[in-house]
Image: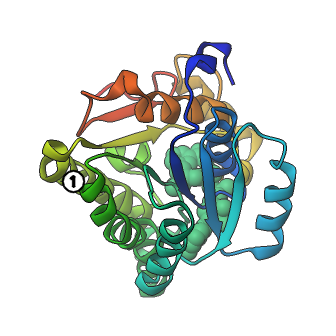
Amino acid sequence: MSDLFSAFDFSARTALVTGGTRGIGRAITASLAEQGARVYFCGTNRELGEKVEQELSGSKGPVHFLPADISSLDQAKTLVDTILEREGQLDFLINNAGITRDNIFLRMKEQEWDEVMAVNLKGCFNCTRAAVKSMVKKRFGRLIYLSSVVGMMGNAGQANYAASKAGIIGFSKSMARELASRQITSNVIAPGYIETEMTAGMTEKAKEEMMSLIPARRLGTVDDVAQAVIFLVSPLASYITGQVLQVNGGLLMP
Ligand SMILES: NC(=O)c1ccc[n+]([C@@H]2O[C@H](COP(=O)([O-])OP(=O)(O)OC[C@H]3O[C@@H](n4cnc5c(N)ncnc54)[C@H](O)[C@@H]3O)[C@@H](O)[C@H]2O)c1
């Protein structure tokens, strides 16, 4: 994480990062904790969650893992209520958890559509629903949603994923309009191609083809995305809401 961010002190802030057990969510969890925030992260893999909690235990702010499947409204509510009971507040909600079930549309099964919508889009509804009342009461909140460049470009073989990521943008903009007067901002981060387990399955040839389309000539890193989150939750971004911040090396300039 860049030294530029060392000026932030988030020790009075509590954050929830969904899907923090690996990839981008893990980097966001680590970065927020590095700025002193009290960070909770969730995931469905308890063993991995506890391992990451242990690995990040030396951070400036405390890091806690809570197992939860965010596609369930009940589990999202229990997750947020646990944080509110322990901390009395939830300031930053980072809706990061996401899955892919890729298939060309002619072969796409209903289950592949439903599973992606349940985690990627309904998961955002579930966690926001669980968290937003307490933010309204406190007159402060930062909502961040992880979309994707393919939510704007579309992608062959990802109709379900692209639709869920486009849906997130409309959802976040609506939250921005409803909540701005309560000092709650809502913004989307739309990463391009980031090196994580999610993209590890790409062949070298596919990676090279992708890089030829990226003006920066490299895939993104998880820290490229985490730094954008730190900016958007920081006091520097208090007048920024309803926006989509592209973190894609110039791949798409809408
Ligand atoms: N990697 C990329 O290139 C890329 C590009 C654009 C957008 N994104 C988005 O960024 C986010 C993170 O991507 P990543 O590459 O780190 O993914 P990843 O697959 O490496 O990690 C996803 C995380 O979400 C968690 N998760 C999955 N289903 C869950 C559920 N039902 N409940 C709770 N947690 C759940 C997983 O346990 C994991 O911690 C996703 O929303 C993804 O769509 C990624």
Residue 70 in sight here: no
Residue at 23%, 41% in the rendered image: 183
Label 1, residues with CA under 10 Å away: few <14, some 14-19, many ≥20: many
Q: How is the image coloured?
A: rainbow
Residue at 48%, 67% in the rendered image: 84
Q: Position of residue 206 (x, y in %)?
A: 66, 41
The quadrant of the rendered image in which ligand 1 is seen is: bottom right
Q: Position of residue 168 (x, y in %)?
A: 32, 56
Is residue 99 placed above or below 241 in the rendered structure?
below
Among all residues in the image, which is located at the extreme top? Answer: 4
Secondary structure under tag 1 reads helix
- Judging depth in this view, the residue of 102 and 188 nearest the camera is 188
- Judging depth in this view, the residue of 6 and 154 nearest the camera is 6
> The C terminus lies in which quarter of the figure?
top left
> Residue 210 sits in which quadrant?
top right
The amino acid pointed to by label 1 is: Met
Q: Position of residue 215 (x, y in %)?
A: 52, 17
42 lies left or right of 234: right
Q: Position of residue 67 (x, y in %)?
A: 66, 75
- Judging depth in this view, the residue of 22 and 126 nearest the camera is 126
132 lies left or right of 205: left
- Judging depth in this view, the residue of 191 and 29 nearest the camera is 29
239 lies left or right of 81: left
Is residue 238 placed above or below 18 in the rendered structure?
above
Q: Disc 1 marks which residue? A: 175
How many marks overall? 1
Residue at 63%, 32% in the rendered image: 35
> Residue 208 sits in which quadrant?
top right
> The N terminus lies in which quarter of the figure?
top right
